[in-house]
Image: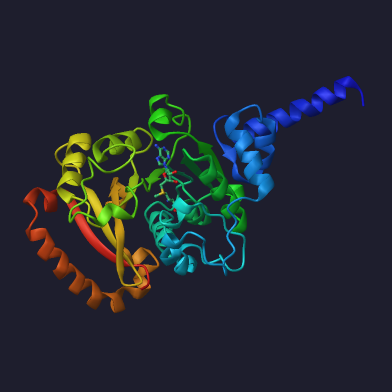
Amino acid sequence: MLWGQQTEIEEKIFVDLTEVMGRTFIHASKIKHAARKRKHHSNFRTLIKLLNNDAYKIESSKPLKNGKLFKYWKNRRRLFSKIDSASIYMTDELWFSVTPERIACFLANFVKACMPNAERILDVFCGGGGNTIQFAMQFPCVYGVDYSIEHIYCTAKNAQSYGVDDRIWLKRGSWKKLVSKQKLSKIKYDCVFGSPPWGGPEYLRNDVYDLEQHLKPMGITKMLKSFLKLSPNVIMFLPRNSDLNQLSRATRKVLGPFAKCKVLYVKENGYMKGIFCMWGECFFNYEPASTENSRRESSEKEELSSENEELSKREKHESTTTTKNNTVDIYDVNG
Ligand SMILES: C[S@@+](CC[C@H](N)C(=O)[O-])C[C@H]1O[C@@H](n2cnc3c(N)ncnc32)[C@H](O)[C@@H]1O
């Protein structure tokens, strides 16, 4: 091969890679290639090791060695329905962090119904890909960020198992740093979603979850501000016992006195799993008739009305500003 030809080929690889990575992100389907290309960087060396060892692969029929995770393993099919038929990758932390598939699927359908023309979704704490994968089922470009290289790897591998890795771009990094260095602002995202760490399974220790003190890596006000820098449409998945007064205060502080936050309480398998908090006009004009849930609407009504009674009982204990700045709905993803 002539020297000139070789250079041309090298150049072509370089161009392909930069296109694929958008200079910042790694395409989930090219993760091995990108890791080899950047092996001088310690994160990518770790990534190569994980890939070579096929690390964190779950054997669905084998209970986990860590007994504390047994209850999560028992519900493994709720996390990833393909766990028996495809290769799924999970770290210990992901067992209690991944958004269950039906909830993630419900959210992705909901966002699609609210923003049918959206193309780019950013998943700020992508974890094992629970949300990223379901968004990729609905939208052509999904960007996932996580500060754990192990979790980035799990998201990429799980996305491959779900056949959506060609629609996913990933980046390892700390959210605070990425925002302060404006590392993500070159892309115009239609919606920014985040399921931030709640502080482990202990989040229910107190009756009310303090969104300013306990949410990681920053309190709700700062987090909302940081998400809104990248898109006017923002969704966060937060604990079901979140302090709605703090949510109202954060909304007013960041978006002004008349701004609203839509809150959806999400139930799965009879349990309230958490709340989706939404900011952005498109989420307010949403009509249930336009999503999958419409088919279930009539059968749900009875259950919803009793839930609403329960909720209004709760709301009586909250100040009027909460009801003024939040709209509250409940959805049962089981239908
Ligand atoms: C609740 S999990 C997200 C689960 C994800 N939605 C899923 O379905 O798989 C939170 C994730 O945030 C990541 N994380 C924690 N602190 C972070 C930070 N400062 N910057 C970026 N990611 C962070 C953790 O590594 C973890 O994967």
Q: Residue at x 44, y 61 (%)?
A: 69
- Along the line of sight, the residue nearer the viewer: 246 or 46: 46
| Residue 40 in the figure: left or right of residue 77 | right
Answer with left or right where residue 14 lies relative to residue 161. Answer: right
Q: Quadrant of the N terminus?
A: top right
Foreground of the two, 119 or 202: 202
Question: Relative to 286, is 226 above or below?
Answer: above
Q: Is residue 101 visible?
A: no
Q: Residue at x 56, y 65 (%)?
A: 83
Q: Residue 219 vs residue 127: left or right?
A: left
Residue plotted at (29% across, 75% down): 300
Residue 247 placement (x, y as % from top left): 20, 46
Residue 327, picture quadrant: bottom left
Q: Position of residue 42 (x, y in %)?
A: 59, 30
Camera-side residue of 285 and 95: 95
Q: Is residue 237 visible?
A: yes
Q: Residue furthest right?
A: 1
Question: Which quadrant does ligand 1 occupy?
Answer: top left
x, y percent for residue 62: 57, 67
